[in-house]
Amino acid sequence: MEEKILITVGRQIGSGGLQVARLLAKELGVDVYDKNLLMMTAKESGIAPEILASKDEKPAGLGRFAKFLGIRSSVYADSQVYSDASTLSSDDLFALQSQVIRAVADKGSGIFVGRCADYVLRDYSHLMSVFITGDEADRIARVMNRENLDESGARKFIADGERRRSDYYNYYTFKKWGSSASYDLCLNTSRFGIEQTAAYIIRLYKEFKG
C-alpha cells in the first residue's frame, strides 16, 4: 500500500498558490481538491451546488463571543447538520465540507486548497500545511492579467477577497490567516518561482515524512 500524502495549501490572492497546488498534485501523482469539494459536498448532501456556493468560505458572522458560548457546537457534531437546504447556514456548509475533506483524507492522498483544510485535518499524522505568498507588485500584475482589471481594480479585488478569506479562516480555526505561526511552511513565489516553490515543498515533505 502506498504511503499517504496530505498537503494543504493556503494562499494569498495572485500568489500563484493554486498553480503550485496543481504542480504538487501532478508531480506527486495525487488529486487536488479546491472548488471541486463543493460539487462533492453537493453530491453527498443532496443540496444544490448553487446553494452551497452562496455560503462558500463565508463565516456565519456571529463573532468570537458567540463562539465561546457554544453557538457553533453543531459544526463539530456530524449528525447535527441541517438537511433542509432553505435553512443551510455557513456553519452547516463548513461541517458538511469538513466531513467530505476528512472522508477523502481517510481514503487516500490529496492536495487540499483553502477551506480551512489545515485545521480540519490537523490530527492527521501525514499532514503538512503550506501557505503561499508573493510580492504585492507580482500579485497585482497576475490579478490584472487574470481578471482583466486595471491596477486599482486589482488592488480592490485582492483586498476584498483576502478580507473574506481571513474572516473565514480566523472564525473557524481560531488561528490567524497568513500568519507563519498558523502553518508548517510559508513560501514566497516571487522569490522562488512557481515550479521551484513546488519543488521545495515536495522535497521538504519527503524529508518530513522520512
Image: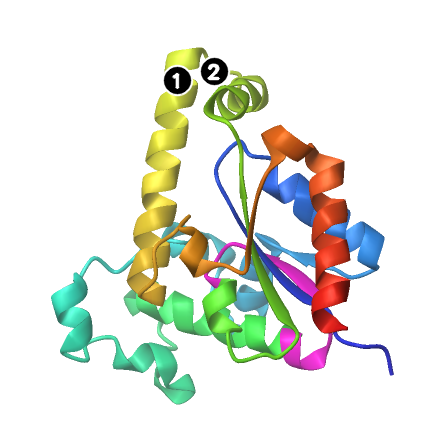
Residue 171 appears left or right of 132:
left
Q: Is residue 112 magenta?
A: yes
Say what secondary structure mark 2 lies in: loop
Percent position of residue 151, x then y: 43, 13
Q: Is residue 14 magenta?
A: no
**What is the number of callouts on the image?**
2
Say what secondary structure mark 1 lies in: helix
Percent position of residue 161, x then y: 39, 37
Q: Which residues are magenta?
A: 105-116
Identify the residue position indicated by label 1 in the image: 153
Q: Which residue occupies 52% across, 18% down?
A: 144
Disc 2 + disc 1, Cβ < 8 Å: yes
Q: Which residue occupies 45% across, 11% down?
A: 150
Percent position of residue 33, x then y: 64, 58
Closer-to-camera residue (81/191): 191
Q: Residue furthest right?
A: 1
Identify the residue position indicated by label 2 in the image: 149
Residue 108 appears left or right of 66:
right
Q: Quadrant of the C terminus?
A: bottom right
The image quadrant that residue 20 belongs to is top right
The residues bearing labels 2 and 1 have C-alpha atoms spaced at a distance of 5 Å
The image quadrant that residue 79 belongs to is bottom left
| Up-down relation of residue 21 to residue 49 (above or below) | above
Q: Is residue 69 among what the camera can see?
A: yes
Q: Is residue 109 among what the camera can see?
A: no
Answer few, some or many: residues within 10 Å of disc 1's Cα (few below 14, many 20 plus, some between 14 and 19). Answer: some
Kindly identify which numbered label has been placed on residue 27. none
**Amino acid tagged 1:** Gly
**Amino acid tagged 2:** Leu
